[in-house]
Image (tube, rainbow, N blue to C red):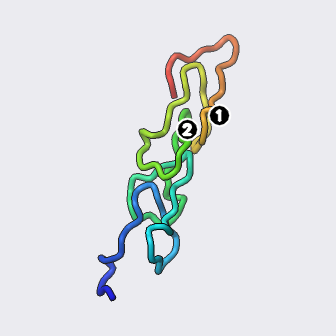
């Protein structure tokens, strides 16, 4: 066997793993859509950061906040951790928005 914890491999960025005594990287779980994680070796899904309001992320296992896509101009979205562009709401009649996000 191995003689110290240094020989234990961290789950990659964009993933987490909650158990102990795990024997393969297949047991590392991807952070869910609408979130990302830049660090490796995290132990809980709550450590995956949610994409900010005004953005969304459709993929899982994302490793950078820049992968969160901004809502298009003329739309907005108030929640964090959103998983699709459908959640971006059109500006109401009589209003506009020129930027994205």
The answer for how far apart the CA atoms under marks 1 and 2 are is: 8 Å
**Residues at badges 1 and 2 in contact (C-beta under 8 Å)?**
yes
Q: Which mark is residue 21?
A: none
Please name the residue that numbered disc 2 is placed on.
56
Q: Position of residue 80 (x, y in %)?
A: 58, 42
Q: Disc 1 or 2, which lies upstream in sequence?
A: 2
* Circle 2 SS class: strand
State whether residue 57 is above or below residue 22.
Answer: above
Please name the residue that numbered disc 1 is placed on.
87
Q: Position of residue 62 (x, y in %)?
A: 46, 48
State whether residue 82 is above or below residue 26.
Answer: above
Q: Residues within 10 Å of mark 2 (few under 14, many from 20)?
A: many
Residue 64 quadrant: top left
Q: Position of residue 76 (x, y in %)?
A: 60, 27
Q: Which residue is rendered at x = 30% and y = 76% of the image?
A: 6
Q: Position of residue 75 (x, y in %)?
A: 60, 23
């Amino acid at each position: 066997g191995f003689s110290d914890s240094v020989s234990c491999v961290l789950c990659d960025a964009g993933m987490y793993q909650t158990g102990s005594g795990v024997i393969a990287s297949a047991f590392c779980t991807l952070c869910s859509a609408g979130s990302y994680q830049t660090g490796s070796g995290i132990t809980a899904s709550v450590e995956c950061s949610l994409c900010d309001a005004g953005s969304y992320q459709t993929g899982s296992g994302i490793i950078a906040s820049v992968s969160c896509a901004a809502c298009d101009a003329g739309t907005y979205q108030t929640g964090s951790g959103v998983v699709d562009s459908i959640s971006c709401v059109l500006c109401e009649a009589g209003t506009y928005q020129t930027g994205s996000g």
